[in-house]
Amino acid sequence: MAKNSPWITPAAAIARDFPAGLTELSPRAQVNLRGILDESSFMTAVKTATGIDLPITPNKVATGKDHKALWLSPDEWLLIGEGEADALVHRLENALTGQHVAINDVSANRTIFELSGPHGHHVLMKSSEFDFHPRVFAPGDCVQTLIAKSQAIVEQVGEDAFHIYVRSSFSRYVGAWLAEALAEYGAPA
Amino acid sequence: MTQHFRATSGGRINRRKAINFTFNGQSYIGYEGDTLASALLANGVHLLGRSFKYHRPRGIVAAGAEEPNSMVQLGEGATTEPNIRATQISLYEGLTASSVNVWPNVEFDISAINGLFAKIMTAGFYNKTFMWPRSLWMKLYEPVIRRAAGWGRAPTTSDPDIYDHMHLHVEVMVVGGGPAGLMAALAAGRSCARVLLVDEQSEFGGSLLSTKRQIGGKDETAWIADMVAELEAMPDVTLLRRSTTFGYYDHNYLCVLEQKTDHLPAAERKGKVRQRVWHVRAGQVVLATGAHERPLVFADNDRPGIMLAGAVQTYVNRYGVLPGKKMVLFTNNDAAYEAAIDLQAAGGDVVAIIDCRHEVSGELVDAARALDIEILAGYAITGTSGGKRVESVEVRKIQKGAKVYTSAARSIDCDLVAMSGGWSPVVHLFSQSQGQLHYDEAKACFLPGTPRQVQQVAGALAGQFSLKDCLAGGYKAGADAARATGFTPKRKPAAPEIDEPDAGEIEPFWVVPGSRPIGEGMAKHFVDLQNDTTAADIELAVREGFESVEHIKRYTLTGFGTDQGKTSNINALAILSGILEKPIPKIGTTTFRPPYTPVSYGALAGRNLGDWSDPVRVTSIHDWHVNNGALFENVGQWKRPWYFPKAGETMQEALNRECLAVRNGVGVLDASTLGKIDIRGPDAAEFLNRIYTNAWLKLGVGRVRYGLMCHEDGMVFDDGTTARLADDRFLMTTTTGGAAGVLDWLEEYLQTEWTDLKVYCTSVTEQWATVSIAGPKAGAVLKKLAPEMDISHENFPFLSFKEGTVAGLKARVFRISFTGELTYEINVPWTCGQALWEAVMAAGAEFDITPYGTESMHILRAEKGFIIVGQETDGTTTPQDLGMDWIVSKVKPDFIGKRSFTRTDTARKDRKQLVGLLTDKPDDVLPEGAQLVFDPHAPKPMPMAGHVTSSYYSATLGRSIALALVKGGHDRKRQKIFAPLEGKTVTAEIVDPVFYDKEGERLNG
Amino acid sequence: MLNIDCPWCGKRHETEFRYGGEAHIARPEDPAMLDDTDWAAFLFMRKNTKGYFAERWLHSHGCRRWFNVIRHTVTHEIVGAYKMGEKPPKLPKPAGGAK
């Protein structure tokens, strides 16, 4: 099997100059999974393949040993893991044979920014109409919303740390926007 | 110049910090904490500008946002701002400002001669006078009027300042930081709700900044400080000063303009955000916006030195300024007496109180009497005199109900007239939120009635005019708001002991007659100072047939302008009420719309400027295009290479080279922008069968088919190729601009109409970068890149795809063609796009592989007569109109659009149909969009026959080609058609839209 | 700006959604059986309600679910949002000012 390398992350050209608090993460396996929640065989098979109980509460993240799953819609999840997606896709395909599912490697479809530090919240307030206040949004939560004018998934991964999943073609727009939003707080440019 | 009118002590200014500033070229000194208005008054400057129409001298009237007169041009150069209210400009070191609407200067203004012609410059003057001849309006009237009437100058260079936006969600938003607002925020904050408190002033306190009160044993300053300290200590309470809530929109969405650096000297602003617009979503809103004082409408009530009584009190108490040393107070209520008492206490002299009520009594009246101030009850001011500053007033005894007062006149010398016609609650935001108003006869004002949104009102806005009521009302509103959002307020604290005078009664007095009837003689009774609208103008408007308050507003201009009639609206409609003899509630108010005060475009735009005004989407090969000299075209939000000119090439030369390379050698195109949707499930083929116009059930795995999508009305809305990846799985491509819309469309049918179909759609647009190589040499290039792939025509025929390794990358290769040439579209993961592109360029070097852009792509496909959705179609074009009947299934019982193809409209013979056009002169390239006619000699307006949808010079054919939609075009082949253009008419022949390789022989290279 | 209650994601700002027009207009089972008038009625005729109105929205930047909303076209009051196939919520008495 051919290797997907050299892998150039979509925002690499601008990410070098990001201020402290903003980075573009190295690539990781991203697999979009759709299936019928009501069929227990589906949940069981996914658990077998990934070790994860898929989150059924909207906008929640379930984390397992090697993977995590982000709720995207009542029949859709984004699975994230380290390394290449092929293995995960195969495991899922095998476990779910015969079921009505859709499994897509989307590792290249989005890039992931990590926003961290004391001003992460402020940057999100500048960039999104969603309420990221700690009372409403906490580690283990994810949301699909707009960052500036681009669709994005935001996942809170720590008290002051967020992962922002952005469609590759929008990544420079969003990356530059976030970097500029941070600049006000005196982070070295 | 020293500050002759600064009181020896008092005020909230910092007398140790002197601030230098310049007004109209003259240098002055003020103090930290001053506004431009208070500093000018301290220096004895009342004359700030000239009025809009009559160019009468005008001065400061108010002390806040309601100021109608004192608009100045602030700053210079790129950051200059016109028409800023001097009452709302915090003084800073080095401030420069000048008057607007004056020429050559404020002291001597040429247009003041308009005053002599005032008789003819009544309501509707411009409409009536300059209507005719119409041709002169643009050339002569408008420029002259604009120069004479224009207010400030807009900057001519782009705004260098930084603006941004912030989104905030709170349970309780409190608008207004006066006593009621502070209490509301406290009540809500103590319940642990998230609270936002917004105030337009530099410090919280509202009316308490202008009055002296004891609250629970503390003076007002200490009380405010304690309140603010407690609020600031609460982690989930946000306090915004210098922030104006300018808009109240649906579902408790409010916009606030925070002025972050406008009060700082220029050197301290650098690199900082100047203004920030807060977008707030609030669970509950507490409006505590206070009240504005109303002027009284009397003869020549507009001279500099005639001010609102509350403003006088503010200048005295907050800024330590005596706006005058010999004051006359003119009032219809007790509350205004406090201004007189405070001015006297600060060292001024109150020469008389003119009270239009016949009987006056009460605590404040007694206090004024105790100071030996003369009180003339049952009197009114019937005239004023003075050039650039009021010098005296004429007072007469009021004859009740009389249109003319014949009583003896008495003249009183003064340098300041304070006036008070009562208070109008600031209902603007309440009204913006669609709340209904009701008129309160006793308080003589409009008050909030039934709200439309989840909100509370408190303080003077709610008619709670005493401090005691404000505090109690504010606390209750805040507690109610918190409770309504699910929080439990703490027990209400005991009401503090408050030392305040009884505000007494008010008796409305809307317009004061003089010795001659209103409108006669030279005296003017101004209602709207900013627009120079007088009581006589309103009378005239009624005489001319206007009765609705909205019409009166537009005809007389009352309530327009930067102040939006904050001091004039209520007086105007009360006067209208008097003329029409209809009660005030029956007249109603005009509509209050955002913004409450003007907001600069910079602030509204925030950071959505330039490259960020809309997202720019780029492919993973974008940098290569940039580095290799591509010019770009916007396609939706995408930047696509348009063409790749070489040094010295014209655009046409570059296009010719690119197109010929594809036809004769090999070209390469970045096609990554096409939308890609993975469609999977046991019913996927059936689903496509219903979505597309052609048949899909029998498409073999590994094969690709072109499809056309229509809406239910039968009109084409997207097209593209779809490959069958597996029995139950397809990969659909959509147009670049249509990707999101198509996915929404597919989901709509799956989720709302055909819920029984087992199909999942997943967008994979940016999973795959697409490099398309086209031309007779394309196979040779691919062979080098994928030596193990069998690309023989037998094993890799047209309209099929293969998975494999290309340039060492995991790839899918599609054999489709948009150029008519042998074409391979190689898909690799997005992140490998640039690596693939570079490999293709290297492998193709020996064949002189030529990158081409969207323009050459358009030419090549037009040569083949292939449509582009959105160019050959416009939402009114059916497949049949496009001559694409071949792709519309006659067999399928139903698919989206089918039923509409037999509607009488879509079956019309004279519909616009797609044809090719060949101009008689091969070098004539028709402009795209050109209208076409069958008879160029027909009288105008000529009947239109259609329009050109695509037009190019084709290097392949050595001549121009065009596609067009022409009425009944399919039956008009070989006929002539004409494009009447500016200066010439181009003749063309209607032909088949396929110009090149009609048999499709080139597809195999 | 509207605050729309997505049945899955909760209240979100209008900018995350796409409007889908009047709700409860089912595509005819067999369009071929309809005459031109009935087909045109399905294609083009929509209510222009002043008051409570059932309409379709798509949470396009969120969970990509289509759902229905009852919104008052004058006050923008949203009475409730409900999933496809669910029954609309009971309408309150008309709000002040709009009938």
Image: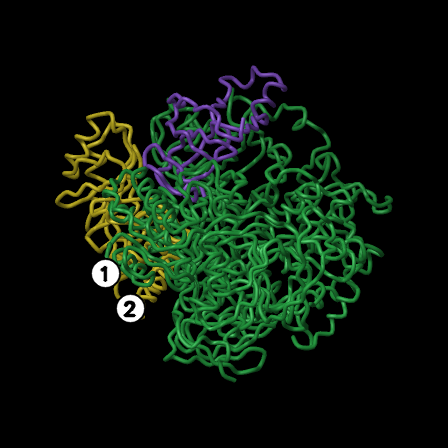
Chain colours: A yellow, B green, C purple
Q: Secondary structure at mark 1?
A: loop
Q: How much space separates mark 2 and mark 1, taking CA atoms?
A: 10 Å
Q: Amino acid at mark 1?
A: Gly
Dot 2 surroundings within 10 Å: few (below 14), some, or many (20 or more)?
Answer: some
From the top left corner, tell me how far across and down residue B711 is, in percent: 54, 32
Q: Nearer the viewer, residue B782 or B194?
A: B194
From the top left corner, tell me how far across and down residue A3 is, in percent: 25, 53
Q: Which residue was labeled with disc 2?
A: A187
> Does B643 sit left or right of B750 as displayed?
right
Could you tell which of marks 2 and 1 lies nearer the N-terminus? Answer: 1
Q: Residue at x 63, y 23 (%)?
A: B902
From the top left corner, tell me how far across and down residue B707 is, in percent: 50, 35
In this rendering, the answer to whether B526 lies above or below B472 is below
Q: Nearer the viewer, residue B372 or B38?
A: B372
Q: Quadrant of residue B232?
A: bottom left
Tell which residue pokes out farthest to the left in this image: A65
Q: Amino acid at mark 2?
A: Ala
Q: Is residue B702 visible?
A: no
Is the residue under label 1 in contact with that under label 2 (CB below 8 Å)? yes
Q: Which residue was labeled with disc 1?
A: A117
Chain of the residue on which disc 2 is drawn: A
In this rendering, the answer to whether B529 lies above or below B44 is above
Dot 1 surroundings within 10 Å: few (below 14), some, or many (20 or more)?
Answer: few
